[in-house]
Amino acid sequence: MPVACALGVDCAIAVYFDADPTAEGRDYLCGSMTSDGHTGVDFAATDYATMDRGIAVVSAAPGRVIGVRDGEPDGRGQVDPETVRTRECGNGVVIEHSDGLFTQYCHLRQGSVTVLPGDTVDTGTRLGLVGQSGRANFPHVHFEVKQNEVPIDPFSGRPQDGCGNPGTPLWAPETAAALPYFAGLPYHSGFAGEEPAPERIRAGDYDDAVVTAGSQVLVLWTEVWGVAAGDLVRMTITGPDGALLVDDEVEIEATQSWWYRYIGRPLVDEAPWAPGQYVGEISYTRAADSYLWTTTTTLDVQ
């Protein structure tokens, strides 16, 4: 693993390698968790709060450092490509391995790079921290593998020659086992006492939101990596007495790598919210294979 994190907890694979040589981006399983021409795998921090706490970027294999850059500022939200022209990788590290193999790590946090050109590194040597430097619109590390200058998908061991082709993953067996394919992963959810703004959700501003008995609205929100058109998302809020307060289901209209939604209920007739524990449940059903993924979050109203 090029990052010291737990998938689905404090990080997620946001974008896979584009295995399709045509203009239609397809990941190694022919899914839509990629973009056209993407030559690496993006390991994303779940939000800015997690990025700020620090996720280590580490060497995926032993080798020798041949390139380093640091000092580029970290962005927040969308980045104008013109402002980072020729510095798209941001703060990064390039490592040379054996047999013509190279790995590159991009978008590291400013000031976090810990190695220098010429350094020898082992598997797991810390290189820096996940950031958002260079041409990056969310906090992540872009991990890229090249064999004799040709980008290779670590999940298949193949170049961009078509999705679904059999291959041999470059990951060690234990690493592959820790990297199940995610498509449709609600990875970041919670409650709020106001209509949530997407940039504040990603910044982690609502992670410890306080909702009081007098809050004018009760909101459940979620972020999802890798939604596909036709997938279903159901969100419910249950009160302390077990009563279902909100039940909402929506069909995803367009395939995209990141998606968010919130549901809520206003205070009725100024009657305060009953004290106790409220439960939010998010259920994600993939249209392709009917796979169901469910997560819950709770809120204590005093």
Image (cartoon, rainbow, N blue to C red):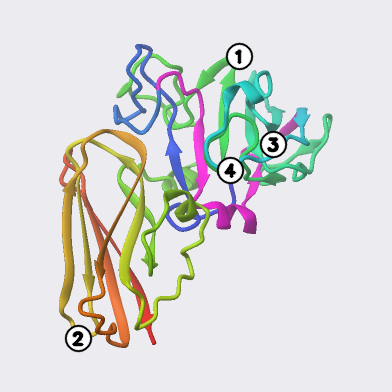
**Category of crowding for the residue at label 4, using alpha-carbon neighbours closer than 10 angstroms: few (below 14), some (14–19), many (at least 20):** some
Crowding around mark 2 (Cα neighbors within 10 Å: few <14, some 14 to 19, many 20+) is few
Name the residue that disc number 3 marks. Answer: 62
Where is residue 208 shown, x and y percent of the image?
Answer: 49, 70
- The mark nearer the N terminus, 4 or 1, is 4
Q: Which residue is mark 2?
A: 241
Name the residue at 65% across, 19% down.
85
Q: Quadrant of residue 66?
A: top right
Assess disc 1: are there few (<14), some (14-19) or many (≥20) residues with their C-alpha within 10 Å of its C-alpha.
few
Give the spatial CA distance, label 1 vs label 3.
18 Å
CA distance for labels 3 and 2: 56 Å
Horizontal side of residue 76 vs 33, given as left or right:
right
Pointer 3 or 2: first along the chain: 3
Task: Name which residue lies at 69% across and 36% down.
Answer: 62
Q: State if disc 4 and disc 3 touch (CB < 8 Å).
A: no
Element carrying mark 4: loop
Q: Is residue 87 magenta?
A: no
Residue position for label 1: 149
